Every structure is written in structure tokens, then in C-alpha cells.
Image (cartoon, rainbow, N blue to C red):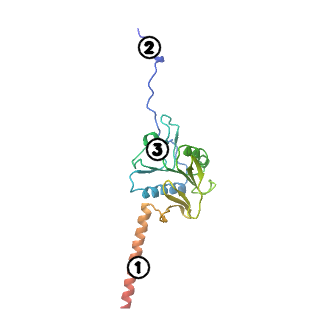
Amino acid sequence: MVDYGEKKNLTYAPTDILYPEDDGKPMAAGDLHRSQLIRTLHVIEAYYASDPMVYVSGDLFIYYEEGVPSKSISPDVLVSFGVGMKQRRTYKVWEEGKTPEFVMEFSSKNTFEKDLTEKIEIYESLSIQNYFLYDAEDLYLPSQLMGYELIDGNYVDLPCNENGIHASSIGLAFQVLDDGLGIYNPSTGELLQTPVEREAKRADSAEAEVAQLREQVARMQSQS
């Protein structure tokens, strides 16, 4: 006769490990913080849009130790080269074969202490070349814009000058402007824009040209 009580001693194969896509917590940030973050993502996405091997994302969990879901971090912005711009739910380092080259945090009242301590240590340990921080409200960080670069395995503060702070990993410079965070192509000096901003600027230029042409025609008619 089978002793069904022995079932208590049976061992079962573990179920598949779950890597959550979010922590179930809403983003606790104001409108200025949110709009600046979204704009930054759109600007960088547009800059790399022609290169299908560059992945730009944000607010996405990076899992950096297989089998240990607690080993995760979620930067507000990330850029990773050579992995392809495809849709992802999470970024698993062991599947991608590498960590991102660039990460950025938009610090707020609830996150700035962790951004300045725990996250620096994690990003440094993952050998992420650049870690940048930005405080949209200029209330929490020691400096509104901060940048670090990995040198010999350790993060070193990057200087901020009249051209902002240069992120060598992505070839862009960040600078605090009167209306928010500016992102430049340092090789050309061009201030980068979102596709919507570019289209609006193009439309304004076309309208200005039409107005100038009408003015010239009117002047010629008055002289005839």
C-alpha cells in the first residue's frame, strides 16, 4: 500500500524564475521632472534613430545576475550599443551579452539619496562607462547636473564648463539651460531637438520665408 503521507518528503523542481517588469510603484515626480525626462529620451532616440544597433530606453529594469531577480536596477535613461533597437520588457545582461554604456537618473525628493549612493556603487560595479544625474527642480543634488566616467574601474567626477558635461560613451554633451536640459553634439555645436521640435522649427522657418517673400513682392509693387 502506498503511504500518501510520504508526499510531504517529495522534492519539486523549482518554477521558472520571474523577472518583474515593474515594482508596482507609480512614478512619484512632478510635471517638470516628467516632461524633462521624456524629452531627454526623445532627443537621444532621435539622434540614434538611423542606427538600428543602438538601444535607447528608460525606466526599464536591468537584471544583472541570472537567477537572482533582486539584483536589478532601473535607470531613467539608458543607452546600449550593439544590442539592437528592439522592443524589450526588461534588460537581462546575460542575454544581451553586455551592460549599457550610459545611464542617467532624474533625481527627485524621493530618489536623490539613493541616486548619490547605492546607484553609483551598482553602476560602477557593472562597469557602465557614464553615469549622469539631473535635478530638474534644482532642489536636491549638490549640482543640478552631475556626471561620472569610469576610469580604471572607478567613477571619477566629470568637470562642468561653458559647454556642459561631455559623456564620452555616447558622444554627447549635456548642459543646464534656462528652459531645461540641453543636449549637444559637441563636434558640431548643434543643440539637439526632438522630432516634434524640429518639425515646429522647420514650419516656423518656412512661414518666415513666405512672410519675407510677401514683403519683397509688396515692396516691388509699391515701387512700380
Q: CA distance from mark 3 to mark 2?
A: 49 Å
Question: Any mark on residue 212, and which?
Answer: 1
- Seen from this angle, which residue lies furthest right? 142
Which residue: 60% across, 51% down? 156
Query: SS for tag 3?
Result: loop
**In the picture shown, does residue 132 fall above or below 23?**
below
Looking at the rendered structure, the kind of residue marked 3 is: Lys
Which labelled disc corresponds to residue 4?
2
- Of residue 125 and residue 20, the one placed in the foreground of this image is 125
Q: Which mark is residue 25?
A: none
Circle 3 Cα neighbour tier, 10 Å, few/some/many (<14 / 14–19 / ≥20): some
- Asked if 66 appears above or below 185 in the picture, the reply is above
Q: Position of residue 149 (x, y in %)?
A: 56, 52
Label 1 is placed on what type of residue?
Gln
From mark 1 to mark 3, how far is it between C-alphas?
A: 53 Å
Whichever of callouts 3 and 2 sits on the residue coming sooner in the sequence is 2
Name which of mark 1 and mark 3 comes first in the sequence: 3
Q: Judge the density around disc 1: few (<14), some (14-19), many (≥20) Cα neighbours within 10 Å.
A: few
Residue wearing tag 3: 98
Please state, as top left, top right, bottom left or bottom right, where the N terminus lies in the image.
top left
Residue 224's spot in the image, x, y percent?
A: 35, 91
